[in-house]
Image (spheres, rainbow, N blue to C red):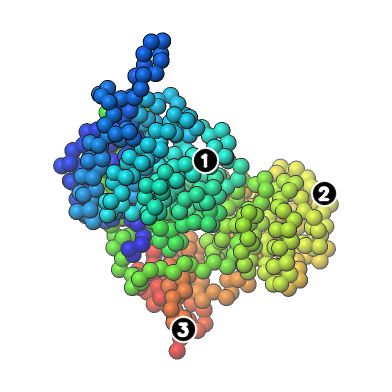
Amino acid sequence: MKEFMLGCNYWDSAHGTDMWRCFEKETVEKDLEALARTGVRTMRVFPNWRDFQPVKKLYAWQGEEHGYVDADERPLSDPTGVDPLMIARFREFAAVAEKNRISLLVSVMTGWMSGRLFLPPALEGKNPISDPEVLCWTDRFIRGFVNGVKDLPNIVLWDLGNESNCLGPAASRYEAYVWTAFVRNAIRASDPLRPIASGMHGLSSGSGFWTIRDQGEITDMVTTHPYASPTIKNDIEPMNRLRTTLLPTAQSVFYADLSGKAAMMEEQGGFSETLGNPGMQADFARINIYSAFVHGLKGYLWWCGMNHTDLPNAPYPWSMIERDLGMLDNDRNPKPVGDAVRLAGERIDALPLEELPQRRRRATLLLTDAQDHWAVASSAFVLAKEAGFELIFASQDRKLPESELYLLPAVTGWSVMDQSFFDAILDRVKKGASLYISYDGGHFTRFEEITGLRSRGIVKSRKAHRARFTFGEVSYRVESEMLLEPRGAGILAQNEEGNPVFSRHVFGKGAVYFLNMPLEKTLAETCDAFNGTLWYKIYEVFSEDLRRKEPVSSRNPVIGLTIHPLEEGKLFLAALNYGDREEDAELRPAPGWTLSPLAGSGERIPGCDAGFYLLGKTE
């Protein structure tokens, strides 16, 4: 698919972050030829700010400033301070990339990379986010660099920079917003045609300074860097098991939905062979490529193209997770991850589609006040995938999506949500939608009317309980729980003390399901919470009406499905195995539908792999 950007991030194999000051065209040519053979067709590259704008400040008597010079203390050849030699080298590099049919995503403000700041000498020690002198030279750099290379035909996308929220501290959300808009405006003033991506790392959905909403408002695309790392609570289990394989997609969908903009997995890697051996890293890349593709993301880039195991220049000696990250080994031969990228790209390209339509989503998860948004949203995404339905993530600052099912997971705090937004949800339920609420000590108005349950008070029991559901018995622990008695609700499960745990209540033409535990919050940091457990069965219960309408289902919770409408009543089906073992797909077309494999077996799917199918109506 031409629109799906597949490839890697790139620093050359001989010098890493010093590649521009030690530029070797022969090295670049060998690197890019090898990467192109390994399926790389898009490459994210980084003009090191230190090297491209090497301005130095001179001082006179008693530290009085005496103007700016270049690195060799000669007068600046250009008011922007951008080194024309570096522009020439970048253009030479871009020509080599074009020769190998590689398009470029350029991270303009690369002042942070792999744990080190790279600032022009004159700006060292200053805050790049807020210092007026730094911002002055930031504007000059952007104008000098972008105007110097914007005519290159294989540049397809600008980034604000590389994880620019790591450059320095922002004092407020407004300061982060102003920096983002400042850099966006400077790029757009020089090149109004190409889209601009965020390039950020670790954005907030709530009270943080660098927010998903602001980045979506200002840029054309949001980006995720979802490793198997603590950044997204994803360092709990091996990197090729369900949850670790799914959370990168969950984060990317989360960013796209909350920002209102397209998203891509801009960098993802293996860190080290301690985290996962070469075969596991290949699994991680393969399933994430397929998952990014079917979930409507704009691309997938591995970190990094080349290995940097023996480089002496900082930051490589500082950290053991910055060295052995390449798709290729030190001899430029593909590692297993390189083969995985190539084969996945070939398989996607072979699909008989001009483009892949967006997947069908019929359920909406609503973020509420006071909760840990990501912990709750990520667990719900995995549970929904296991149960067989797709989520939209929504917040109160946007219009309530039309859905057949709404989820309010792990509700906590005194505010929960604005009354008008909650009333809009209840109005949808009265008209026939279903609502699921899981409880984490939050407060409700009209609780008995909505749930058919009467509260006898909240206890912060911190107890371990057992509850018997129709699908089996499970153990769980709570911080807070309500003591409940039914007032019209049907009790679907109760614990060993007889306290209701799960219930269903008719509300207008719809139904409200209430779970007396913070399931999603609890599972977020619990090892093996989703592997061989029954928790997803709760999601099956309250989504039954929605799932009954689907033309196909899988009885295997490790197999995640996406359904994409095509022309003439046909559907494209992707079945992804998010686990590390071969699984029976257990695909069951509904009456009146037939299933035809396009790629992969119709019966079994290898670990961290995919099957693609065509669904059609029977004659």
Which residue was labeled with disc 3? 617
Q: Is residue 342 left or right of residue 617?
A: left
Quarter of the image with the N terminus in it: bottom left
Image-quadrant location for residue 171: top right
Which residue was labeled with disc 1? 178
Q: Above or below — where is 491 with respect to 174?
A: below
Q: How far apart, in angstroms, are the residues tagged by discs 1 and 3? A: 53 Å
Look at discs 1 and 3 and give the one toward the viewer: 1
Q: Nearer the viewer, residue 411 or 185?
A: 185
**What residue is drawn where x is 28% and y is 51%?**
151
Total numbered labels placed on residues in the image = 3
The label shown at residue 457 is: 2
Image-quadrant location for residue 175: top right
**What residue is drawn where x is 57% and y is 40%?**
173
The kind of residue tagged 2 is Gly
The kind of residue tagged 1 is Val
